[in-house]
Image: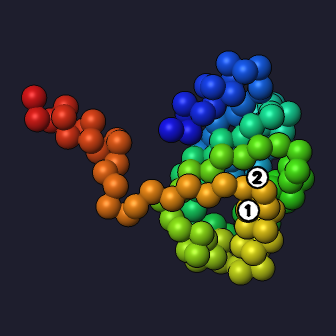
Amino acid sequence: MTIALGVHAVEQGYQVSFISMNHLMYVLKTREYIKKSKTRYKRIRDSDLIIIDDVMYMTYESQEANLFFQFIYDKYDKVAFILASNKGLGDWGKFLGDSTFTTAILDRLLHRSEVITFSEDAESICMKYRQSIFEE
């Protein structure tokens, strides 16, 4: 669904960046040292819409949580975000390891936002297609 929304935004003339949370962390940590990361960061920074997939998929160190907070803080009120996560907002603190960062990040992300939650028993689209492949 996030990709479809991103494609629609591109069709409307907006600049869109799609990145996984893990890759975003890598870019944020290495943008000062690796030219490719600096270029990717600039492209993300200049986007109208930033789609981040697999948010809170894994636990992050405090340095990474700080980098993510700074990124959200810098882009707050300047860009639209779409975040996809299989974790509820209440679980984010466990992955960021700091309730202060978690609260600050969520304050900015949830201000003027729409939260769409799918039921926990909703079938994964990936698994649905994977199953059909193996049934043949």
Q: Position of residue 100 (x, y in %)?
A: 78, 79
Mark 2 is surrounded, within 10 Å at the Cα level, by few (under 14), some (14 to 19) or many (20 or more) other residues, namely some
Q: Quadrant of residue 11?
A: top right
Image quadrant in which the C terminus is located: top left
Q: Mark 2 sits on what residue?
A: 29
Q: Residue at x 87, y 58 (%)?
A: 73
Can you say whether 88 is above or below 54 in the image?
Answer: below
Whichever of labels 1 and 2 marks the residue nearer the N terminus, that label is 2
Which element type, helix, strand or loop, lies under badge 2?
A: helix
As rendered, which of 103 and 23 lies closer to the eye?
103
Can you say whether 5 is above or below 27 in the image?
Answer: above
As rendered, which of 59 and 78 lies closer to the eye?
78
Indicate which disc residue 110 carries: 1
Q: Position of residue 111 (x, y in %)?
A: 79, 61
Q: Quadrant of residue 38?
A: top right
Can you say whether 45 is above or below 13 in the image?
Answer: below
Residue projecting furthest to the bottom: 99
Indicate which disc residue 16 carries: none
Q: Residue at x 57, y 62 (%)?
A: 56
Q: Position of residue 64 (x, y in %)?
A: 72, 63
Instruction: Give the tally of numbered discs.
Output: 2
Instruction: Say what amino acid the circle numbered 1 marks.
Output: Leu
Q: Are marks 1 and 2 in contact (CB under 8 Å)?
A: no
Q: Residue at x 51, y 65 (%)?
A: 87
Mark 1 is surrounded, within 10 Å at the Cα level, by few (under 14), some (14 to 19) or many (20 or more) other residues, namely few
- The label nearer to you, 1 versus 2, is 1
Horizontal side, residue 95 vs residue 37: left or right = left
Q: Real-space Cα distance between discs 1 and 2?
A: 25 Å
